Amino acid sequence: MSMTITEKILARAAGRDEVKPGDNIWVNADILLTHDVCGPGTIGVFKREFGEDAAVWSREGVVIIPDHYIFTKDVKAHRNIDILREFVQAQDLPYYYDPGTANYKGVCHVAMPQEGHVRPGEVIFGTDSHTCTHGALGAFATGIGNTDAGFVMGTGKLLIKVPETLRFTLNGQLQKGVTAKDIILRAIGDVGVDGATYCAMEFDGDGIEGLTIEDRMTICNMAIEAGGKNGIIASDDKAEAYVRARTDKPFTPLYSDPDSPVREHRTYDLSELVPCVAEPNLPDKYAVAADRTEVKLTRAYIGSCTGGKISDFIMAAQILKGRKVSVDTFLVPATQEVAEGLMSEHVDGQSLVEIFADADCLDIAPPSCAACLGGPLDTFGRANTDEVVISTTNRNFIGRMGSKQAQIYLASPYTAAASAVAGHIADPREFL
């Protein structure tokens, strides 16, 4: 029986030779990820169901990365961190990345692969919808709720339905100024925010070779914005080198059979894609950036698991070097590693930090999710009433970045930076 990569990973994790879409199977987890928003709820379910003194199924299988509401004066947000710390201490968990310490990392979806917790062929469950990011390294990764996560925490397994697959074949190379963000916004625009509901979004084609690991993370991250169960790109030499540089744990990649059946197959010539935006208030509101230059902006935001990686800031710096922004421009590195990279990485002999300062961007925030999820009132970058924001984040729902009146346009770092300079939505190819 021919199977897709998603089906093969789930079959192996279930101890089966084969599975097919629609099968309900018990799957063994390799990693359970949680953070400060959902971690306390997950811990509550775990203690209720398994007992106050129960041990987690695997100390090394539980990864806890606070990242959402951590740089705030909000008392309830601080209480969540206290709950995590107490649990980690009681369980003696090795993979807890504590805010305010040298061990703090930043946004979980970028920190996870950076710290070697993502490996090809493995199963990752996370209490965050953007857990699908980790399919970029050939893993099955999906978001689950606190109840399911509490069960996984105690048993190491979960009953799931095998998803159908939508295959997106990417051929050719992107032109200058067009990015992975433009690829996934185009795909979501084509299928709609519910077009991949409970499906695996698999990306293949000769164009994958030309994409960096961070590019692939951006694509898989937003599979959930089309309703996807997971996003996935098969591991290759580039992915395996990335993983082996970060962990010595063994892994065995899996790959789709060439003739594996899928529900739908779309093919894209990457050379034909252009810079784009997703208009308010859904990620499938695709529009060509050059066709929206009449949209005046009040701020730009470069950050998040989708747009706060070091490659994202290098793109922004290529636009901003020697120029000034004309709207408030907020910068939020995804992780501490990225924050350090802003000082060590250079564009034409100048550090990214210097470029952003010379361009009159606002002070760089500490690594976190920040305004991507709105957050408490004192959250850095939180949008106010009547703001019109161009953002490298992954979601533009009503109220997503704070005010329900704010209008959020999603875009690549190139497009966001070019638009910050112009004061309106702009095509970054005019600046490169």
Image (spheres, rainbow, N blue to C red):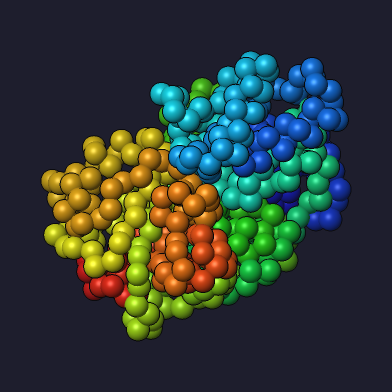
Q: In the rendered image, which quarter is residue 163 located in?
A: bottom right
Residue at x-position 24% and y-position 68%: 326
**Residue 74 at x, y percent in the picture:** 53, 41
Q: Is residue 142 visible?
A: no
Q: In the rendered image, which quarter is residue 52 located in?
A: top right
**Residue 219 at x, y percent in the picture:** 51, 56
12 vs 401: above or below: above
Of 7 and 34, which appears nearest the observer? 34
Residue at x-position 61% and y-position 34%: 80
Of 39 and 195, which appears nearest the observer? 39
Q: Is residue 231 visible?
A: yes
111 vs 210: above or below: above
Of 236 and 145, which appears nearest the observer? 145
83 vs 135: above or below: above
**Residue 410 at x, y percent in the picture:** 46, 66
How many badges with numbers are in the image? 0
**Residue 15 at x, y percent in the picture:** 81, 34
Q: Is 409 left, or right, of 363 in this rendering?
A: right
Residue at x-position 65% and y-position 32%: 31
